[in-house]
Amino acid sequence: MLNPTITMANCAFLQLTLPIFTLVLILSSNFIQTHSQQFSRRLSKTEMGLKAQKLSHLHFYFHDIVSGRQPTAVRVAEAAVTNSSATGFGLVVMIDDPLTLGPNMSSKIVGRAQGIYGSADLSKLGLLMVLNFAFTEGKFNGSTLSVLGRNAVFSAVRELPIVGGSGVFRFAKGYAEARTHELNFKTGDAVVEYNVLCTPKLHSTHCDIILCCFKCISLWHFTMRMTMFPIFDDVRSFK
Ligand SMILES: *[C@@H]1O[C@H](CO)[C@@H](O)[C@H](O)[C@H]1NC(C)=O
Ligand SMILES: *[C@@H]1O[C@H](CO)[C@@H](O)[C@H](O)[C@H]1NC(C)=O
Ligand SMILES: *[C@@H]1O[C@H](CO)[C@@H](O)[C@H](O)[C@H]1NC(C)=O
């Protein structure tokens, strides 16, 4: 589930779009010039090569255990007003929360969420989250994603920015969507579902080779069609 996959649909899409993309790039390269006397201007994604950038999708569950003998989230600091504040303003919690494939704590552990969250909103419950997802599974083992964002824990979906990464996630950018899967009001323990969308796109070397072949074939196919059978193609499309 953690493994980003390249589907045949992806490859087919690439086959269609790659030649067009290449053509657009060649044509547009003439227009990439800086205009002096201009403070700002819009840049197209194509110019910057961003349109071709694909995303990785990670899915896992985050277990925030504050109760029991072995809590994974512990209170490390508070303010004088924290206990009397409706939002626990000033509370700081250090976490080393397990990340699992499924919602059940006993399912496979794929990493840990290590860092700090603090109550940072005086009027509504909103946490400042500063943490790393430290992955331990397969090719992700040893790689991290860094999160820095606001978590309004009672909202159905919270969006947290991914601000960077290490290992296979070097130069990472993206966002995480958090949804509370389970919250025990008695103990305060919570299970949160995370969907992370970020660059870079990761795939196996196996897929690399297939993708490369696809690119070559589609480029050749496109060239042949444009040079040899442009008319026939038109006729066929009306049948
Ligand atoms: C606030 O409440 C917590 C948990 O009930 C307690 O451990 C802590 O000592 C309290 N802090 C103050 C300043 O009263
Ligand atoms: C979680 O897994 C354990 C052991 O496999 C099982 O006993 C338990 O019922 C499961 N809990 C849920 C909520 O599915
Ligand atoms: C992850 O890497 C560490 C250190 O390199 C190693 O000890 C551990 O067995 C690895 N875990 C997995 C699941 O590959």
Image: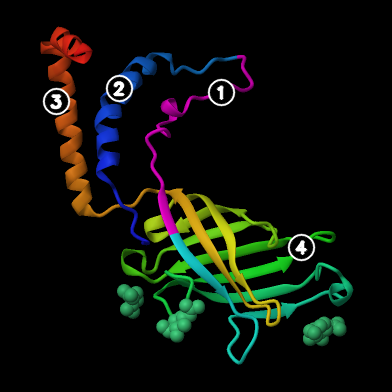
- Which residue type carries mark 3? Trp
Task: Determine which residue is flagged by label 2.
Answer: 20
Q: CA distance from mark 3 to mark 1?
A: 34 Å
Sequence-first tag of 4 and 2: 2
Which color mode does the image show?
A: rainbow
- What segment is highlighted magenta in the picture? 37-58
- Mark linked to residue 184: none
Q: CA distance from mark 4 to mark 2?
A: 48 Å
x, y (%) of residue 139? 31, 64
- Mark linked to residue 125: 4
User: Does residue 186 belong to the magenta stretch?
Assistant: no
Query: For numbered disc 3, what is the local secondary structure?
Result: helix
Query: For numbered disc 4, what is the local secondary structure?
Result: loop
Sequence-first tag of 3 and 1: 1
x, y (%) of residue 161? 58, 52
**Which quadrant: the N terminus?**
bottom left
- Mark linked to residue 42: 1
- Which residue type carries mark 4? Leu
Sequence-first tag of 4 and 3: 4
Q: Is residue 231 left or right of residue 98?
A: left
Q: CA distance from mark 2 to mark 3?
A: 13 Å
Q: Nearer the viewer, mark 3 or mark 1?
A: 3
Prevailing secondary structure class for the magenta stretch in the rendered image:
loop
Q: Is residue 133 left or right of residue 188?
A: left
Query: For numbered disc 1, what is the local secondary structure?
Result: loop
Sequence-first tag of 4 and 1: 1
Q: Is residue 190 left or right of residue 141?
A: right
Give above or below for 219 relative to 102.
Answer: above
Q: Is residue 100 left or right of residue 65?
A: left
Task: Determine which residue is flagged by label 3.
Answer: 220
